[in-house]
Image (tube, rainbow, N blue to C red):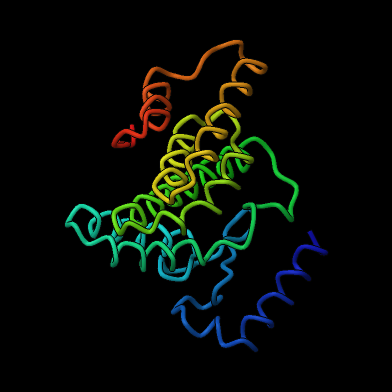
Amino acid sequence: MTTLATYIYHARQMFLREGIASRTPHKDGLLITRSPGYSIQIDDDEADIYIFECLVRRATASLDAGDPAAALSELAQALGLWRGVAFSNISTGPVLDAHATHLAELRLQTINMKIEALRQLGRYQAIVPELRSLVVAHPLNEFLYCQLIEALYRSGRRAEALQTYHQLRTTLDLELGVEPAPEVQRLHLEVLNCGQVMLV
């Protein structure tokens, strides 16, 4: 407890030097003594996750209102807050592991929204690099493969789109012993026949 109290003291001094502690009216400053330990008092707009969620809500509203350009700007700001995997520099237990998983899913949903905004703007070439890295990170996610197949096809890269479908088919067969979903197979046939591709 003595060691912890020493760390808290130094943290409070650091906050004072940085001018952070002055933002809170509490007498202890940012770090509050609360039996049996301590807590940090911050406003929502001082935590990255709250800023992120606010930007994503605004982007969702922009997309719903038919303004993909505004949504793209807000999503870029939101994704710019990420510096890597959440809690990667600390030891975690079940509670933080679950929260880290939740944050990773939020980030993936946000990337999907960004891709949708780019699709609505017709910027298919810009989507391809990110989708390629996403299918490597999520090799069983058929929806991401669908987006990549469509983006490649609409970018004039039909052969690569077909190759991507076969990559998915092989992966699903080896890993799970299943065929791609019917919607994905329909998408493959449309590309194969040079049809009007509609993302499933």
Is 69 drawn above or below residue 176 in the view shown?
below
The quarter holding residue 160 reads: top right
The quarter of the image holding the C terminus is: top left
Q: Is residue 48 left or right of residue 92?
A: left
| Residue in the picture at 59% in, 36% down | 138
The quarter holding residue 2 reads: bottom right
Quick one: which residue is furthest to the front in this view? Answer: 193
Spot occupied by residue 168 in the image (x, y as percentages of width and height): 57, 27
| Residue in the picture at 47% in, 45% down | 152
Is 150 drawn above or below residue 33 in the view shown?
above
Is 34 drawn above or below residue 163 in the view shown?
below
Spot occupied by residue 41 in the image (x, y as percentages of width and height): 50, 67
Spot occupied by residue 180 in the image (x, y as percentages of width and height): 49, 19
Is residue 130 or residue 170 the one in the foreground? 170
Is residue 152 or residue 138 the one in the foreground? 152
Q: Is residue 23 left or right of residue 139?
A: left
| Residue in the picture at 36% in, 63% down | 72
| Residue in the picture at 32% in, 36% down | 197
Q: Is residue 170 left or right of residue 121?
A: right
